[in-house]
Amino acid sequence: MTTSFPPISPKLKGFMHGADYNPDQWQHAPEILEEDIRLMKLAKCNVMAIGIFAWAALEPEEGIFTFEWLDRVLDRFAANGIYAWLATPSGARPAWMSAKYPEVLRVEANRVRNLHGGRHNHCYSSPVYRAKVRIMNTKLAERYAHHPAVIGWHISNEYGGECHCDFCQEAFREWLQERYGTLAALNQAWWTTFWSHTYTDWSQIESPAPHGERMVHGHNLDWRRFVTDRTVDFCRHEIAPLRAIRPELPVTANMMDWFEGLDYRKFADILDVISWDAYPTWHDLQDQGALAAWFSFNHDLFRSLKGGQPFMLMESTPSMTNWQAVSKLKRPGMHLLSSLQAVAHGSDTVQYFQWRKSRGSSEKLHGAVVDHVGHEHTRVFSDVAELGGILEKIASVAGSAVPAQVAIIADWDNRWAVKDSQGPLNRGIDYERTVMQHYRAFWELGVPVDVIGSDDHFAHYKLIVAPMMYLCTEQAGAAIEAFVAGGGTFVTTYWSGIVNESDLCHLGGFPGPLRSTLGIWSEEIDGLHEGEYNALVRRDDKLPGLKESYEVYDLCDLIHTEGAEVLAEYREDFYAGRPALTVNAFGKGKAYYLAARAKEPFYADFYGQLIQEAGVSRVIDTELPSDVTAQMRTDGENDYVFLLNFSGQAQEIGLAGQAFTDLFSGRAEQAAVHLDVHGLRLLKRTKAGRI
Ligand code: GLA
Ligand code: ZN
């Protein structure tokens, strides 16, 4: 495993700390730039992302470019040791463009073309939009790729959405022709004989529509894949002129938390570094442990997109957002905790939306480092400056790796397919929540996890979990089989191995390609009403960590063993006594099947036991109170152990007799450490000190 990665930019060793900055909004007040630079230094900010929505300021009229304001900003940055992620402005565009070339406007699924307005409202196939983007990006690259302040490209902003215009329909058909070759193959893959939906000409195929076709699962799935591929293609189109001028300048595109609309794994190869925008709604009414685990999961997902390479926290709010029903202020400590949570999971940056509040429009009241009052004497500014100081102090952590021995498989096409299917639980199949049930158990145990796709490499993991792997291809099944045969431990659940890549059911018995690895056959599955429960009852004492019984709900799979051993059985209903949890010894490894959705503490107990069996190490072998997690980065020589307290209470954590140095205070710690409410500790242990 790689344990030491080069810095994201050779110009900035250690952490990046900064924000989205919109000097284009303050051109009428030139003194603001100088004041901002003074404040950036005070806040210990060393990077800004600029120009994100600046197209109208860069090209106020077609073909008339006004770069002078940006020259001044970048020159002043360079003179003051501040660096810039320079954005391409395609996330929004000037009104003149929409007025002159309506084809750049997006068409919704109902086939109505949008008016100009908002942002992210473009067609990604429009030849005019692509041409305009190429001209703009080429000019930016020519002028700034070698500017001393520019350390990388911030491509567009939070790509998302889809377009149903004629260009996009044509592109969809071409994409399908490439995928299937013949109409006969497409008709077979989509099972179009159903309801007489057989296509006899490519021109008959359209994107799914609320007033048209939306019941052909393979069609829906391919459309979503196409939307990803089209967006990747647009992103590649944006990047080409930048790389042509200076290939070594890193390129990123900011992403959103486990965004459903785009399969982010497909972007990994065209980006040099992954970045994402995290907005945890701390102190709201939901379970704060679940919220914290969700953000940890996302950090792990984004780190895993590029094989564990450090990622960027590109946006987070330094104080509050302005889009929640109720926006709570971050309680003392929370800014540090939330920011270092990202670092603990592999981020080498802490960046915000936004540096200075815009004076008008919809985000004028969204949190920023600099408030409308205009000075540094605010609670938020002090929090940011304090964090800046801490990031400087812990600079040695940057570039280190997260050593995960456990992986969770979470494929986008599985997620799309399982949610699209009409089956045993249409009131909500709860795919994401299911994944989180499994993830949270590891989070509570303090076990680092990678979040991977089914076509990633498996060999270096000890334990792989694939919750509700409804869509399982033959290739994925074979890879899992090889992983288990080679000595790995695999866990999957009810509603797995049901369909292939075209959303066609596997014939010959579920769970299809996983059947022999798991040593079971699933004959049928029972849906349970809300409030209805069955129970999973331990058989003998085969898995010692398990309690006598656990409640199960939502889905109960009725399986037959074909070589697997039964660890637990159902307690009630006509299937009482039938297997509910099995394990199959396969080759040198083991494959577990959980037949029903269990309630906690099942996952905590089950994985607590399994990590021992599979030889997975915890970050620190100590009792962790609920909603306190331990995460870790390592550079091979030093382990950086993060104890993060999301429990809302002060906590004491034993250190299992290991010798640590507190990276904030420099003090040696051995017995136990105290965590404040919303507190954390960052402890270093040398390899020699590890047990
Ligand atoms: C997103 C966008 C930003 C801003 C923030 C507000 O992440 O990228 O431009 O709108 O949300 O939270
Ligand atoms: Zn379009």
Image (tube, helix red, strand yellow):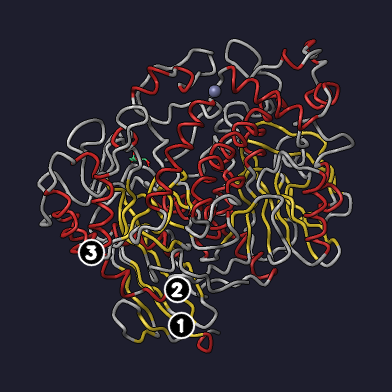
Horizontal side of residue 424 vs 113, given as left or right: right
Name the residue located 28 percent from the left edge and 42 percent from the top edge.
321
Gap between marks 2 and 3 measured at Cα:
34 Å
**Residue 65 appears at what percent x and percent y?**
32, 36
Give amino acid for label 2: Val
| Distance from Cα at disc 1 to Cα at disc 2 | 8 Å
Query: Relative to residue 625, is residue 582 drawn left or right?
Result: right
Q: Is residue 83 left or right of residue 247?
A: left
> At which x and y percent is residue 579?
77, 47
**Contact, mark 1 vs mark 2 (Cβ under 8 Å):** yes
Q: Residue 52, image x and y in percent?
A: 35, 42
- Badge 2 element: strand
Q: Is residue 508 left or right of residue 140?
A: right
Residue type marked 3: Asn
SS label for mark 3: loop
Mark 1 or mark 2: name the one nearer the start of the chain: 2
**Residue 542, quarter of picture:** bottom right
Seen at 73% across and 42% down, the residue is: 496
* Quadrant in which the C terminus appears: bottom right
Name the residue tied to disc 3. Answer: 80
Along the viewing direction, whichever of 354 and 93 lies nearer the viewer: 93
